[in-house]
Image (cartoon, rainbow, N blue to C red):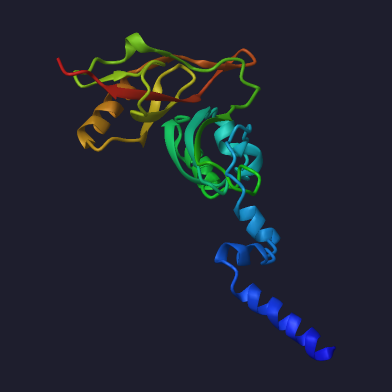
Amino acid sequence: MRVLLNAVLLLLFTQTLNLPAAAQSSLTVPPSITPSEAVATELPKKNDLKIDPAKDCSIPAYPDSARRFGMQGDTILNLMIDDSGKINAFQLIKSSGWKFLDQMVMHAIIGCQVLPAGRWIPSERQVIYWWQFDKGYTSRAVLDISSCKASEKLRIANEQDKELGIVVGIYTSDTGKVLDAKVQWGSDDEQLDRESLRIAKSCEYAPAERSGKRIGNADSIRFVAKAAQ
């Protein structure tokens, strides 16, 4: 009996070895998938979430000196977000008017995780960071564009001009005169930068006021090149 049983087992084993490859594979137990391998097979998600760099990227507080002098404006950036949800690059679209305020945002956001950890489709997102001046001001200094000296090369930008241009920060007296002007974001042409300073220093303002009293105030002017005639 034992000899007969061994012969049957040998016959079954031999038949199994002689099965076609496809049949043999069907008898194989599939390997288990580890959790990390399962995550790797997930499809990347589309970035349709609202992001808030001011909350997620630890942007420093508004400096007291900038607030005191009334330095204000909007830093607008185009963010490039990679497949891990981090900001890996950016483009400055519009300056707040003050380079050091812009750079406070720019230094804080690079490498910042603005999306939950996971796999994402790389995307771009435009964001605005507001620098708001001391609310004690009742009015800002207002530029009188007609008072600025004419230039053959430059003009004062308007809202339709999308380029960054040359940005000049100025400080006015309590009578609206420009006391000082410095290029915040310049061009590749030193002559144009100097020309922007010449124009800015010639401009006059309606003075800023606080509680009915005229005060000095900071402002910025953006210049763009005139179209060739």
Left or right: 98, with 149 as reference point: right
How far from the left and from the top, in percent, is residue 34? Answer: 69, 62
Left or right: 69, with 118 as reference point: left
**Quarter residue 154 falls in:** top left
How far from the left and from the top, in percent, is residue 143? Answer: 42, 15
Left or right: 90, with 127 as reference point: left
Residue at the top extreme? 146
Instruction: Count the marks.
Output: 0
Question: Residue at 51% of width from left, 24% of height from top?
Answer: 217
Q: Nearer the viewer, residue 47 or 98?
A: 47
Residue at the left extreme? 229
How far from the left and from the top, in percent, is residue 151? Answer: 22, 18
For the C terminus, the quadrant is top left
Q: Nearer the viewer, residue 31 or 7?
A: 7
How far from the left and from the top, in percent, is residue 44? Answer: 57, 44
Q: Nearer the viewer, residue 179 or 20?
A: 20
Question: Residue at 66% of width from left, 55% of height from top?
Answer: 38
Question: Residue at 28% of width from left, 35% of height from top?
Answer: 187
